[in-house]
Amino acid sequence: MTTPPVATLPVATLQNYIGGRREDSAAGAFGDLVDPASGELVARRPVGCAEDVDRAVAAATAAQPGWAAVSSDERIGRLERVADTVATHAGELAELQCREMGKPVGLGRTFIENGVAMLRGALADARSYPFDTVTAHDDGSSSRVLRHPLGVTAVITPWNFPVLTVLIAIGPLLAAGNTVVLKPSERSPLSTGRLVELLDLPAGVLNLVHGDRRAGAPLSSHPDVGLVRFTGSVAAGREVGASTGRGLHRALLELGGKDPVVVDAGVDPVATAHAVAFGAFMNSGQICTSMERIYVHRDVAEEFVSALCAAAAGYTTGDGRDEQTVLGPLVDRRQRELVEQQVADAVARGATIRAGGTTPSGPGCFYPATVLTDVDDAMLVMTEETFGPVAPVQVVESWEDGLARASRSAFGLAATVYTHDPAHAAEAASIPAAVTWVNQWQGGGAGMVCEPARDSGMGATGGHATYDAATRPSTVYVAAS
Ligand code: NAD
């Protein structure tokens, strides 16, 4: 059965959402949002501006004391109802994501449900977080540590997981008593716009300004914004970090990656190849933690590569509304051109295309699941983030060689190793990354805390660390009487 098409929906003209009301952008200018599978016009999106940001920050500032005055129990309860609402509307939001950036509807629904689970996990962490603790000292004095909200915070998100990235970011900020101004990506504004309206939070607690960097830059440098939680590219992250630094405000920067995989001798090459295909091709490779550099031990390389090519053939491209589709289009032509350039650079320098590698003719921004071999460390496909369904495989002579190459990168987001050797599994912790997965790609759960290494970002999140970032501690010391 296929998902009913939503292409018959009228072309929406999007508006900002400020102080609980929709309103037009002061800029008065619009950009087109186009369905990357069909090329059809989906929406007109406002090109937000500094004036919109000022209005949203003012609304968030006005709402913040009231929101902070609500007991944390009540705030968390309200946000738990938000999680319920998103779960109820997961299908509708997944269809909007498919229209705006091509993600297959089934996959999109799964990730929205994951986002809801992560939001619930963060709210459970809030219930156990020490917002207000008193320590009595032996001499009769006491110290009270209070965790204050920062005030108005900003959330700036990318297009690859438009709903998930918002849920992860706003939950802890709001639970801690902050208010939020959200600026979603200009390449995926539809689902986030709908999400914000659905949540039914008090006016001004969660505001949304549409637009590109012309709205993002004034938001991240706004003097009344105490923290910017930014998810996006390294280049934009550097700009955000520079402005928050100038304002002496906080930034949580969750940026790009070029994640390595090390496949050790002794593993099942076919099963591992299928796992790697999933890690490299899922969401058309448009995941910050996609597998983008694959180092495979010579002992298993031949069987691994054939199985990876066979697996790639199963990743059929198509419109994400068709349930048979595994690989939707890339988000837009700009992204597809970047992938084409990296593959062309690799081929020009001696790489071999073993699967895919040819842009299909016809409408839509499709690109096939691609396997490259004979790659080397200097090729763009091994150094720059690709964000496409491309699996470059380099054969290594030893585990140590694979581990050393995995660690040699400007990025440090995540890494995966497949090994049956417990000593090798332990050594995987030496790869500079926020998270290292052993014998599985993705996963974490309660208790996970991490901070990206190198250019992949800064600021720890997960568990109580997210609340440490979302609050400012102060101590009241009372002398013994
Ligand atoms: P991008 O940096 O182009 O844009 C991200 C957001 O920042 C958008 O909303 C954009 O409008 C805004 N923006 C751009 N320039 C800005 C500036 N100077 N100041 C303020 N805001 C600005 O990234 P993208 O192409 O939308 O997303 C893909 C990138 O996001 C990839 O690099 C990917 O790895 C990364 N990403 C990281 C994570 C993570 O958790 N580490 C998760 C998802 C995506």
Image (spheres, grey):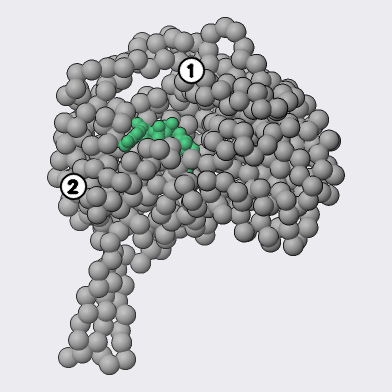
SS state under label 2: loop
Tell me: residue 467, above or below residue 236: below
Ligand 1 is found in which quarter of the picture? top left
* Residue 366 left/right relative to 72: right
Observer-nearest residue: 409 or 207?
409
Disc 1: which residue: 333
Residue 330 x, y percent position in the rendering: 53, 22
- Give the residue type at disc 1: Arg
Counting labels gives 2
Q: How far is the residue under mark 2 from the one under mark 1?
A: 37 Å
Vertical position of residue 303 compared to residue 262: above or below: above
Q: Which residue is identified by label 2?
A: 224
Query: At x 27% / y 79%, what residue is drawn?
Result: 143
Q: Is residue 269 visible?
A: yes
Occupied quadrant, residue 159 = top left
Badge 1 local density, few (<14 within 10 Å), some, or many (20+)?
some
